[in-house]
Amino acid sequence: MDLSVHFLAMPAIVGDLDPAASELLWINDIYGFMVTGFLVTMGTLGDRIGRWRDIRSIDPVRI
């Protein structure tokens, strides 16, 4: 998932939470920071333990 999924979900978020403009900015920023942090963390883990060990640790049944 990337930020385009988030932007597609924004009308539903606005309809459910009815946030102010500053709160929408916070929602966008926090989601972006979370996605970026997850990508950096998974990239580092992939570099250190290898891609296949990383994938097998997530879903060992299907591999």
Image (cartoon, rainbow, N blue to C red):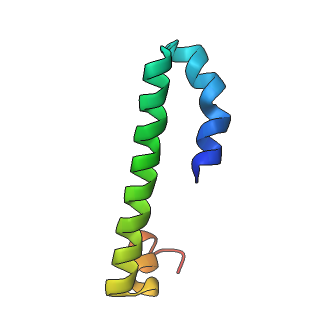
Q: Position of residue 54 (x, y in %)?
A: 40, 78
Q: Nearer the viewer, residue 32 or 55?
A: 32
Quadrant location of residue 26? Answer: top left
| Residue at the (47%, 29%) spot, across then down | 25
Quadrant location of residue 22? Answer: top left
Compared with 20, 7 (above or below) is below
Quadrant location of residue 43? Answer: bottom left
How many tags in the picture?
Answer: 0
| Residue at the (39%, 69%) spot, across then down | 42
Q: Position of residue 38 (x, y in %)?
A: 40, 59
Q: Where is residue 37 in the image (x, y as percent from the top left)?
A: 37, 57
Compared with 57, 32 (above or below) is above
Compared with 21, 36 (above or below) is below
| Residue at the (35%, 67%) spot, across then down | 41
Q: Quadrant of the N terminus?
A: bottom right
| Residue at the (67%, 36%) spot, across then down | 8
Q: Where is residue 32 in the image (x, y as percent from the top left)?
A: 46, 46
